[in-house]
Amino acid sequence: MARKVFVLNGPNLNALGGREPGIYGGKTLDEIEADCRALGAELGFDIDFRQTNHEGVLVDWLHEAGKTAVGVAINPAAYGHTSIALHDAIRAIGIPVIELHLSNIHAREPFRHKTMTAPVCVGVICGFGPAGYTLALQALANHINDQ
């Protein structure tokens, strides 16, 4: 039986493909989802892929993942830089979480250099564009298999 992994996406990621492709790449979120599902099948993961522009919805989904999944890959987008609520939810769920960002947040505006969520995640992947999603799934599989 496949192990469930949530891939959660925060605000404005529904606009990928047309939104600042020089920063975020040209793939749409649907294309990224297809990549995640293909790799997930190879890794033995059942991918539950979701996007919302609402912080509280991400918190609810993290709580759900804590009850039904073996791990989470999350692109919190801007909420990663501001959300204590996401920090607390990740800390509380008791399963490994990998944070990812499409752009290299450390090469951008200073307010993006730090995330509130990173300290409670297993690791952070940033700067590899859409490939960051599959890198996060591979890292999550390695982490889960090593435990």
Image: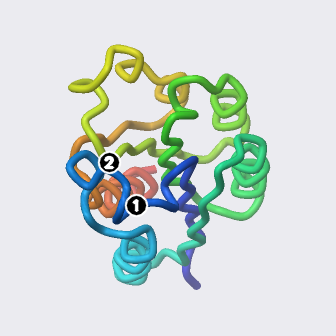
Place of residue 87 in the rendered image (x, y in percent of width and height, measured from the top left)? 63, 28
Query: In terms of depth relative to the viewer, which is nearer, 70 or 39?
Result: 39
Q: Distance between the residues labelled 2 and 1?
A: 10 Å
* Residue at the disc numbered 1: 16
**Residue 43 makes an appearance in the image:** no
The residue that appears at 26% across and 24% down in the rendered structure is 106
Residue 10, percent across and down?
Answer: 57, 48
Residue 45 placed where, x, y %? 49, 75
Residue closest to the eye, 138 or 35: 35
| Mark 1, other Cα within 10 Å: few <14 / some 14–19 / many ≥20 | some
Q: Earlier in the sequence, mark 2 or mark 1?
A: 1
> Mark 1: which amino acid?
Leu
> Cβ–Cβ below 8 Å for labels 2 and 1?
yes
Q: What residue type is labelled 2?
A: Leu
Q: Quadrant of residue 92?
A: top right
Task: Report which residue position mark 2 lands on.
Answer: 102
Q: How crowded is mark 2: few (under 14 residues within 10 Å), some or many (20 or more)?
A: many
Q: Which of 15 and 54 is in front in this view?
A: 15
